[in-house]
Amino acid sequence: VMIISCLLYIVIFPRLYYKRRAFKKMVKGTTVDEMELYDRERLSLQLFLTCTIVWSLIVIMYFISSTAGLLAPENSFLKSSSLTMVSDCMMDVLSKILFLNTLLEVHELVFDETNRADRRLDELCQMMGVVWDSSSDVIAISVKGMNGSI
């Protein structure tokens, strides 16, 4: 079971390599949709990298805690049965901090309507600038004020 687990774990590194290589080929783009796709890919890579780091640390901590008791002197803290629990708790806290960092960035990017509206408005202003520059006609804009007057 340990050999199968290690073989399945090692697959994560080539996947990370190919994902990173594909991301480096991407360009950020100029439209809002292209920029959002780029940000999605960037955050996907960041999350995958975080998973790889956390899982690697969990594997390392497992092997250290399981072999430290065999190699340590009799009165060493490495022989303590609580070492595994303490290292697992530390890894749990570290992984939650790292994943929360990525999740907060995703939340700000995806669910913050103000940022999305600003990006869409910027793109609309760029498109209207092109229309305005290439237009030879007069454009009149009528806006109703707060008091009802034009």
Image: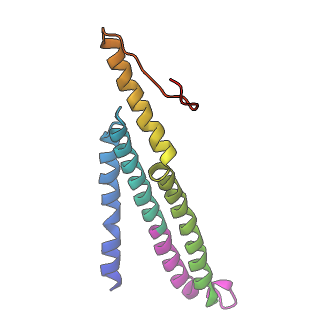
Task: Give me the residue at 59% from left, 84% from top.
Answer: 85
Say left or right for 66 vs 31: right
The image quadrant that residue 46 belongs to is bottom left
What percent of the width, then of the height, locates residue 96? 55, 68
Relative vertical location of residue 133 with respect to residue 10 in this rendering, above or below = above
Horizontal side, residue 140 vs residue 94: left or right: left
What span is in magenta? Answer: 55-79
Relative image position of residue 146 (x, y in whole percent): 57, 32
Which quadrant holds residue 116? Answer: top left
The kind of secondary structure the magenta stretch mainly shows is helix
Left or right: where 91 falls relative to 17: right
Task: Work out which quarter of the rendered image holds the N terminus and state it.
Answer: bottom left
Report whether 28 appears left or right of 116. Answer: left
Q: Is residue 58 magenta?
A: yes
Residue name at image x 41 percent, y 26 percent: 125
Residue 2 or residue 99, whichever sits in front = 99
User: Which residue occupies the extreme right position in the image?
Assistant: 75
Tell me if residue 106 is in the magenta stretch. Answer: no
